[in-house]
Amino acid sequence: MWYQKEIRLNPKARGFHLVTDELVCQLPELKALSLGLMQVFIKHTSASLTINENADPTVRGDFERFFNHAVPENEPCYQHLDEGSDDMPAHLKSSILGSSVTIPITNGRLNMGIWQGIYLCEHRNHGGARTVVVTIQGETKSSN
Amino acid sequence: MWYQKEIRLNPKARGFHLVTDELVCQLPELKALSLGLMQVFIKHTSASLTINENADPTVRGDFERFFNHAVPENEPCYQHLDEGSDDMPAHLKSSILGSSVTIPITNGRLNMGIWQGIYLCEHRNHGGARTVVVTIQGETKSSN
Amino acid sequence: MWYQKEIRLNPKARGFHLVTDELVCQLPELKALSLGLMQVFIKHTSASLTINENADPTVRGDFERFFNHAVPENEPCYQHLDEGSDDMPAHLKSSILGSSVTIPITNGRLNMGIWQGIYLCEHRNHGGARTVVVTIQGETKSSN
């Protein structure tokens, strides 16, 4: 079984945001699969996706503080400056963290660890809504 | 053909460890595939998976030294401190390196370069055993 | 439908290079798919793949400058030195950026954002030609 859907995620402030529920509630198709994979791909180069701790919001705050320090704005070496000081760092963070996550599906659910969630990493000051392509594939329960 | 299995990897010291053999010897199902993909997904937020050089152990040592320098413990900006000084850096390293690897399968074998291997990156001082979900899919030799 | 092909990418100078066209023009099979996924996997540990901005070449220059600063050569902590000062940084950059990209396919085309392209990240001074394994899977238009 293959299923694909574009989902528009609501605009978010610069920072790291847990979006597992915002995604899964729009994907009832997951329940039909006994096993498979779900890929989420973000169609932007200044935001990214990663998997990390889903419980304590200070983890997401520390992510934002760490990456702002590790990938600073206004570095003298940057030449790509036209779109604002947050733009080139956003491109770099996007490639360090990655444009997609792929998660196993088992018995109709995402088979992550209990402390794992999907982060939308918004690297721009005013990134607006972000579009992801979700691709789901696997074996349906009835076909087993 | 779809196949999925949870594998518990033996506890490892903090650092970077080659686990290709520990995984492959538990996956005889690989041999049945003429072509496909294998995904390995780690169900933790303080350990990660990556692909790198499989020959010289000093490479793995240099990884540990580099990442400890790039993602230091006890940064004044961290607020997530309750689980020890190695915890927040472990979350950050986990997202920089990634929670999964996906490797092509060709003629019943992982189609990596001869110098490539799968690393389990253990970012905690006492991480314990780690669980991965391995999902294999592709065309079987007989179905070709 | 499954399809797999090894592609040899022409040698490139150290730096970040847009290779979307070099890949896609060798993959007419993409057109047959109504939906699916394409994985590109690089069989080397000193070059990597990522997705980023496809328009302004200064972005790729800034990537090279940033990563040379973030992952310096000749760090006193490195022990893996035998293959030249660019070798250990190349391994580290390769794992930070990643060995593969996976991109959704929709209506016979890669479903990326309009500003996204595939980068070959060449981390060695003289890396030579690089081999990638492309794995394409999905539903064909006729089977829908």
Image: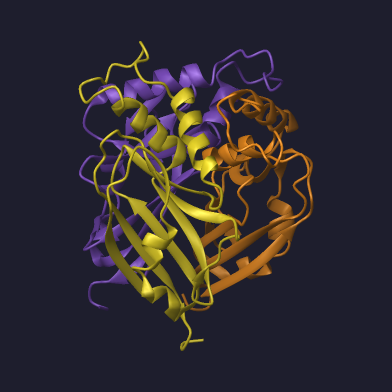
Chain colours: A purple, B yellow, C orange
Can residue B46 be seen in the rendering of this structure?
A: yes
Q: Report the side of A48 relative to B78 (left or right).
A: right
Badge count: 0
Q: Is residue A125 visible?
A: no
Say above or below: A40 vs B127: below
Q: Is residue B47 above or below residue B103?
A: above
What's the residue at 42%, 31% (across, down)?
A121
Q: Quadrant of residue A88?
A: top right
Q: In screen coordinates, is C38 left or right of B139?
A: right
Measured from the top left, where is residue B14 in percent x and y?
A: 35, 37
A128 relative to C133 in the view: left or right = left
Q: Which residue occupies the extreme top position in the image?
A: B76
Residue at point 28%, 71% (across, down): A140
Residue beneath the point at 46% across and 89% down = B142
User: What is the x, y in percent for residue C31?
Assistant: 62, 67
Query: Where does the image place residue A12, in percent across and percent down from the top left?
Result: 38, 27
Q: Position of residue C6 (x, y in %)?
A: 66, 66
- Residue sitting nearer the eye, A81 or B65: B65
Whether B113 is drawn above or below A82: the answer is below
To which quarter of the image does residue B7 belong?
bottom left
Q: Camera-side residue: B88 or C50?
A: B88
